[in-house]
Amino acid sequence: MLCHHFSETCVVAKQNSQVVGFITGYVPPKEKKTLFVWQAAVSPKLRGKGLAAKMLYSILQRENLRNFEFVEATLAPSNKSSYSFLISFANDLGTNFTKSPLFTKDKFGESKHEEEELIRIGPFKTQKLVEVFA
């Protein structure tokens, strides 16, 4: 549904006609210069090879999104691989990586769901993206 309604902010990666990765995102209504990454996945056989960065970069380089300055996502503290990727992405851009509480455990009721932290990368400029990912 996200790829249908928000195709401008989503990407699917294929290799030999097989889906090997995707990122779904959207622009929050009050944050016109922010891409919020809702979901991201990379096939286990391609992890650690830069596919996630290439997909995220491909979204940010789209003509109608070139004025973006921030990427946001929510992560559970145990999601070490996603933290590592997003910290690396921010470092590659030479910009800030911040995290702050967003959904504390009490928001999930009796569920054993972990808290979710808001991750924010930026500000960055499109030219820096071109230099890093060219």
Image: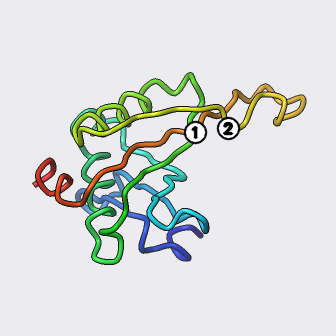
Mark 2 / mark 1, whichever is N-terminal: 2
Q: Amino acid at mark 2?
A: Leu
Residue where numbered disc 1 is placed: 118
Count of labels shown?
A: 2
Give left or right: position of 41 versus 85.
Answer: right
In what element is the residue under mark 1? strand
Q: Residue at x 56, y 67 (%)?
A: 2
Instruction: Name the spot of residue 122 as percent of width and height, x first.
Output: 37, 46
Report the front residue among 101 and 25.
101
Q: Amino acid at mark 1?
A: Leu
> Dot 2 surroundings within 10 Å: few (below 14), some, or many (20 or more)?
some
User: Residue 126 lies in what quarter of the image?
Assistant: bottom left
Q: Residue at x 28, y 46 (%)?
A: 53
Give left or right: position of 49 versus 47.
Answer: left
User: Residue 102 lies in what quarter of the image?
Assistant: top right
User: Residue 1 lies in what quarter of the image?
Assistant: bottom right
Give left or right: position of 106 versus 44.
Answer: right
Relative to 62, residue 91 above or below: above
Distance from Cα at disc 2 to Cα at disc 1:
6 Å
Is there CB contact under 8 Å for labels 2 and 1?
yes
Relative to 90, residue 56 above or below: below
Instruction: Name the spot of residue 132 as percent of width and height, x first.
Output: 14, 47
Instruction: Name the spot of residue 97 as percent of width and height, x first.
Output: 40, 34
Report the front residue among 111 and 57.
57
Find the residue positioned furthest to the right.
110
